Image (cartoon, rainbow, N blue to C red):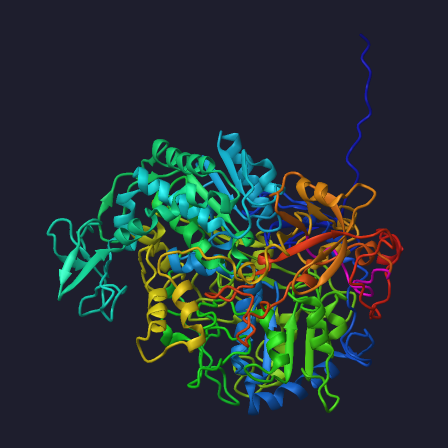
Amino acid sequence: MTDTKVAPRPSPKVSDEVRKTTCYMCACRCGINVHLENGKVKYIEGNRDHPVNQGVLCAKGSAGIMQHYAPSRLRKPLKRTGPRGSGEFQEISWDEAYEIAAGWLAPLRETAPEKLAFFTGRDQSQSFTSFWAQAFGTPNYAAHGGFCSVNMAAAGIYTMGGAFWEFGQPDWDRTKLFMIFGVAEDHDSNPIKIGIGKMKGNGGRVIGVNPIRSGYNAVADDWIGITPGTDALFILAMIHELLKAGKVDLNYLSRYTNAGFLVNDNPDDADYGLFLRDKDGTPQVIDRATGKPAKYDKKGVKPDLAAHLRKGGVTYKPAFQLLAEKYLDDAYAPEKIADQCGLSAQKIKATAAELARVAFEEEITLDVEWTDWKGEKHKTMTGRPVSFHAMRGISAHSNGFQTCRALHILQILLGSVEVPGGFRFKPPYPKPPEAHPKPHAGVQPGKPLDGPHLGYPLGPEHLLINEDGSAKRIDKAYTWENPFSAHGLMHMVISNAYAGDPYKIDTLFMYMANMAWNSTMNTSEVIKMLTDKDENGDYVIPHFIYSDAYSSETVAYADLVLPDTTYLERHDCISLLDRPICEAEAAADSIRWPVVEPDRDVKGFQSALCDLGAKLGLPGFVNDDGSQKYADYADYIQNHERRPGVGPLAGFRGPNGDKNGRGEPNPNQIQAYIDNGGFWINHIPENAQFYKPWNQHYQDWAVEIGLFDAAAPYVFNLYLEPMRKLQRAAEGHGDIQPPDHLRDRVKATMTPLPEWYEPFEEAAVNKDEYPIHALTQRPMHMYHSWGSQNAWLRQITGVNKLYIPGKIWDEKGFTEEENWAYVTSTHGKIKCQVARMDALNENTVWTWNAIGKKRGAWALSEDAQEATKGFLLNHLINELLPPKGDGRRWANSDPVTGQAAWFDLRVKIEKAPPGEHVSEPALPASKSPVGQGPKDIAYGEEFK
């Protein structure tokens, strides 16, 4: 053999500088390395040192370069010159924009602050935007959670102090069975992909519950194609099986939950359904050792879950007994509910048996000593290697809160929360409802609101209603219509403001919420509401200020547009005060910073709020002499303190940057983050990493770094007494009661133990006429409506089709050539293209959300395929239910939280006759304030 020399082939030069920041192509908050060449973004890759993604980056993240250079980027503030919706604007200066905004807002603050409705979309600065709104004095503030996943979040907080996604994660290293409900691919994608790969590599299994088999469900070992809206029935039937087999963790339940709390079980007593409390208000249990009532949190007390107590003629039972009696009833037997769920009874039983087998036969023990909240020392940590994850698919129904509660209770009964192998919270969670603020709406002209806008009510006394029963907030949050609306109801703001119910507003102020298109439940009607005029020729909603980075559909309907930056041009803090990025083993936060400077006259929205807050003289935004307190958002991030020593960022605090969690402001804090790769992380000591709510080591660590001011152990809520208090009011008790027309609904839906009921829209429509469930999902490669104007991501999904199961495909006679359909609901009608999909519940159709575009938006050509063949199901949905003959239009929302019931939609499908293949409705085009982008987007002259 002859030796031959091969000339070296070094990798081509990619960049001349790398800057590390945080991605914002979805809500994962992955760490990224942004490669620059001559000051221009050249390439984006994952940061291997980052705790969230460990270097993994998805298609969205890589395509961030095309987001940054998108032709649709806004360039300057805009003042509307034509009618709303025309897209006709004049570019103006920031000074003029602030003058216009202040001209509308200053008089409101001095006379009627509630006439400002300030609502923000998927931003990650909600502690800051709520701070601004509170300083202004309006009660009308919230972010997008009300139309996203508040059911999941609120049910989790009320049940166990946290939920999935930002609140926690499976113990990926040890879990052996991972069960997901209603999970699409847009949220938390990289961590879940990494985790599934890790657990499958360790021999673990995945069970996916979803009507649609895509994404994570496609890699599940077992796919359960459930009927939409019946997940709670399935979960409660599994609980029935676990109770019947005795496969629940009684030791865990007695130690760490309110299973032993004594509940008044006398239906004739005024306190029926409430806990027995001592004179200090502490719930009572029966002590196993003495057989007598005792404080549940007294050292040495171990609750008896089976004993009863008779006192004062009233019988008291442990909460667990009530739970067992309820779910052991034959009504929850798999045979009774299987058909409704679209499953077999055997599948339900087998799934419950598999959960029990893994939880109890593959128990994990760690040789780690720890001390619990009552001072008892333990030599080991015991775990159940079963974990769960769920998202919008089970949350976005009008029975979603109770469904999510049921799932959380299932985890708890198995003893698989905060244990090795199970679901674990991310600091600063868990935090029970009592640790959160209560909602406030005390309006005083010229003064700040009397407290935080959002919170967790514990009874009727915390609702935001006037003496006449009317709502204090424009979205009717925290009323008898939806008492636990912890994230507000952003989807109801425009329609309520338009109707003047509960009152008229003057100015609608929104940020990054495409409420004239895919973020609204009722696209066509909302467009009419934004453009409708009163008898005087004035717009019904007089003023609309909107901030976005791009020329989205909603921009065209605004009167004043404040142009935001792209995420590579801005400061952000992904704060422990907002939505933590961290792992279960650590507290962590991160920043974004301008890795490139804007080449347009734009500002980060939060910096614009600092300017506007100062111009309006808002407390917290001006110094004692009236001068501007924070030059911009970066200044706020470094110098604001929410309470002494605790600010937006937890890392590198103190004058020298050597303090963690607690410490004085550090003038060089942002630079310290930049030097550390854009993030800070503080690992939890080994003996504090599990059992967080009851682990004294964790409680002490949390106080040390400023998560808590004092140790705050608590127990999980199997039985939710605050719901019983509201239900009790509906039965006629107390000074604060619901209106008569809501009494029956409150009694039926505010049950302290989860109850399944049929989704409201399904109950209201004729199922024979509308026999099909219709759903939307976000694709893994797109998150916001941003994604479908991205030059790279458009090539993956430029057109969405309505996916229909083989049964419907054949019944309707569709073929590959004849594949256009009319889809009709009680609210509207669309025309779209269909495609066959067999990995789908046989009575369900679905599509990707946010692919369809309005002509004239996003700098796309008017004949772009997103506008001509893309479509939205939103035209078929309404924020109100169909009339039911009582003279009222009831909200199409969960009655507990007010979450938008996107997934209760029922439709019928008809084959469209041959003709022009254009999707409908085809709304008139708006003019583009940024012009039209080039045919091809390339890294070349146009970016220099």
Whole-percent x and y of residue 485? 48, 68
Quarter of the picture holding the N terminus: top right
Q: Which residues are magenta?
A: 848-862
Main secondary structure along the magenta-highlighted residues: loop
Give the residue displayed 20% in from the left and 69% down from the top: 280
Is residue 159 or residue 58 the one in the foreground?
159
Which image quadrant is residue 439 in?
A: bottom left
Which image quadrant is residue 220 in?
A: top right
Is residue 507 or residue 826 the one in the foreground?
826
Image position of 608 (left or right of 131): right
The answer to whether residue 686 is visible is: no
Image position of 654 (left or right of 305): right
Give the residue displayed 38% in from the left and 33% down from the top: 357
Residue 942 among magenta residues? no
Which image quadrant is residue 767 in?
A: bottom right
Residue 849 among magenta residues? yes
Whole-percent x and y of residue 325? 29, 50
